[in-house]
Amino acid sequence: MMLMPPFNLHHPNTVEEACELASSFIANEESFDWVAGGTDILPNYKWHINVKKHVISLAKIAGLDTISMHEIGAMARLGALTTSDSVHPLIASAASKIASSLVRNNATVGGNICLDTRCFWINQSEDWRRSIDWCHKEDCGTGSDCRVIPNQNTLCVATYQGDLAPSLIVLEGTIHIIGPHGPREVPAEAFFQLDGITRNILEEGEFVLKVTFPQGVENRVGSYKKLRVRESWDFPEAGVASSWIRGDPSSLRIASTALESIPRSHQAEIDAFDESFSSELINPLSEAIMKSIKPVNNTALPPRYRKSMVRVLAKRSLREILGDSS
Ligand SMILES: Cc1cc2nc3c(=O)[nH]c(=O)nc-3n(C[C@H](O)[C@H](O)[C@H](O)COP(=O)(O)OP(=O)(O)OC[C@H]3O[C@@H](n4cnc5c(N)ncnc54)[C@H](O)[C@@H]3O)c2cc1C
Ligand code: SF4
């Protein structure tokens, strides 16, 4: 049986209270996590993965659940996005492909963006992980190596399997952060950090407040294609989002997820072609995107298959936004 380990749950009512709580834990060198909907972190806690002494819930802070074309609060529930008329259709579509309706009713946008990375060597019970003498992501003081990239215990290559991030990137979203040292904001693609343990650029005590989108985002046509084992609720094994403003070839944006420790923008692959976005560009561009990614063997499907499916997903996504039915 996997029992929830003990921790102290805190419920601040305002952003300021949340920042003060975080500051006091940092000052006292006490470990803590944020919790939003709890659909990712609580299963991890039940598996005794990186359990902290304190957990700060964002659930009682008013005003963090905005949903509009230009702003989505961190506490907006994924279920609410799928039924909203005001959110960008690409966000509604990507959200509807996440987990099951039961999970989506609790799961939040902030939790999805900050989702922990996954790997079949860590997302296991404590007894199972003890039996293989742990791994670098939670080594329990043993200095264990990474099981995926062996003979090193400096880098974790666990896979980021959040579904929303590529859509936030191709809609040119900005992530707004708050913490003990005040607010700051970064473009969505700059939020993530290529390390399966640190995952993103959040400093200790910081949390995500909201995502905003530029004026004109409503003119973007978008598409998100996802590969998963079971259509009913599985995490992505690969995902590709694209968007553009019809008639403006320079507006094309493509991003992928579930292929390494971060979601990735494919602007470099787009910029390497001198051609306008047309049906002729779809095959070579999809091929270039496939070549640019290097999935590792730590999710349900083999990396070679996931890599080859990236080309297929990119083609399908690009055809959809171009309105090409061939
Ligand atoms: C059966 C099942 C299927 C799933 N399938 C999918 C899937 O297909 N696609 C997918 O993307 N996800 C999937 N998930 C994962 C998860 O449900 C979602 O990603 C969800 O959006 C996480 O949101 P949450 O609010 O529950 O996060 P939580 O569990 O509360 O938090 C997740 C992480 O983010 C941190 N966090 C939360 N909010 C913030 C914030 N505002 N600022 C900073 N850090 C924060 C937490 O500390 C924690 O590390 C699945 C989960 C389950 C149980
Ligand atoms: S990638 Fe390596 S260090 Fe990270 S969770 Fe997997 S086995 Fe552990």
Image (cartoon, rainbow, N blue to C red):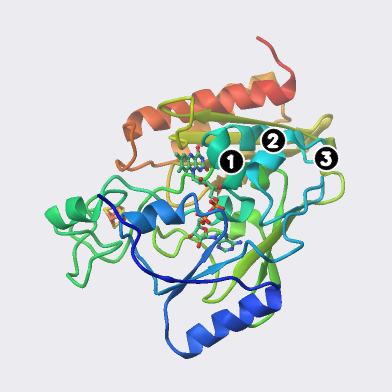
Residue shown at 14% from the left, 59% from the top:
133
Relative to 232, 158 lies left or right: left
Which residue: 69% across, 79% down?
A: 16
User: What element does badge 1 sit on?
Assistant: helix
Task: Indicate the position of residue 246 as horizontal and vertical percent values.
Answer: 82, 29
Instruction: Give SS at disc 3.
Output: loop
Which residue is under mark 2? 82
Vertically, is 100 above or below 108? above
Relative placement, left or right, of 182 versus 193 is right
- The amino acid marked with disc number 3 is Ser
- Write down the residue under mark 1: 104
Q: Which mark is residue 252?
A: none
Q: Residue at x 69, y 73 (%)?
A: 15
Which quadrant of the structure image shows residue 181?
A: bottom right
Q: Is residue 271 visible?
A: no
Does the residue at mark 3 contact the one at mark 2 (Cβ under 8 Å)? no
In screen coordinates, is 12 left or right of 52? right
Q: Identity of the amino acid at label 2? A: Thr
- Pointer 3 residue: 86
Mark-to-mark CA distance, 2 and 1: 9 Å
Disc 3: CA contacts within 10 A as few (<14), some (14-19) or many (>=20) = few
| Residue 68, position as x, y percentages in the image | 81, 47
Q: Nearer the viewer, mark 3 or mark 1?
A: 1
